[in-house]
């Protein structure tokens, strides 16, 4: 017999939860533990492109890569 089933779901209106699993026999006693999951973290690329200022800064940085005279060279031994 199955000892555990793990499912992710979303709360419904009024805080209701519905768990549907064909592996659960009818009228079987179960214990349900609910963990609130954090919302998915925003993708880094989405974040970097999320504002006009960020997009402009990234565009300028990419343009700077075309011109090696704008590079700043650093000797790690001097840090």
Image (spheres, grey):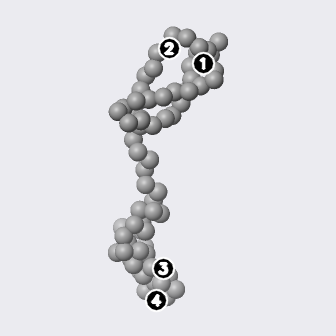
- Label 1, secondary structure: give it: loop
Q: Earlier in the sequence, mark 1 or mark 3?
A: 1
Between circles 4 and 1, the one closer to the viewer is 1
Q: How far apart are marks 4 and 2 (CA)?
A: 68 Å
What label sits on residue 69 in the rendered view?
4
- Label 3, secondary structure: give it: helix
- Label 4, secondary structure: give it: helix
Say above or below: 42 vs 53. Answer: above
Residue 10 shows in the view:
yes
Q: Distance between the residues labelled 1 and 3?
A: 55 Å
Name the residue nearer the viewer: 16 or 47: 16
Residue at 48% over, 79% down:
62
What label sits on residue 30 in the rendered view?
2
Between circles 4 and 2, the one closer to the viewer is 2
According to the picture, the residue beneath numbered tag 1 turns out to be 24
Residue at 42% over, 81% down:
60
Indicate the position of residue 19 as horizontal and vertical percent values.
51, 27
Quarter of the image with the C terminus is bottom left
Q: How crowded is mark 3: few (under 14 residues within 10 Å), some or many (20 or more)?
A: few
Say above or below: 16 vs 54. Answer: above
According to the picture, the residue beneath numbered tag 3 turns out to be 62
């Amino acid at each position: 017999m199955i000892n555990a089933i793990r499912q992710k779901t979303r709360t419904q209106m009024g805080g209701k939860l519905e768990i549907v699993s064909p592996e659960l026999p009818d009228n079987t006693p179960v214990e349900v533990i609910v963990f609130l999951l954090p919302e998915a973290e925003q993708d880094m690329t989405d974040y970097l492109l999320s504002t006009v200022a960020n997009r402009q800064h990234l565009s300028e940085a990419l343009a700077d890569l075309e011109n090696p005279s704008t590079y700043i060279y650093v000797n790690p031994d001097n840090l």
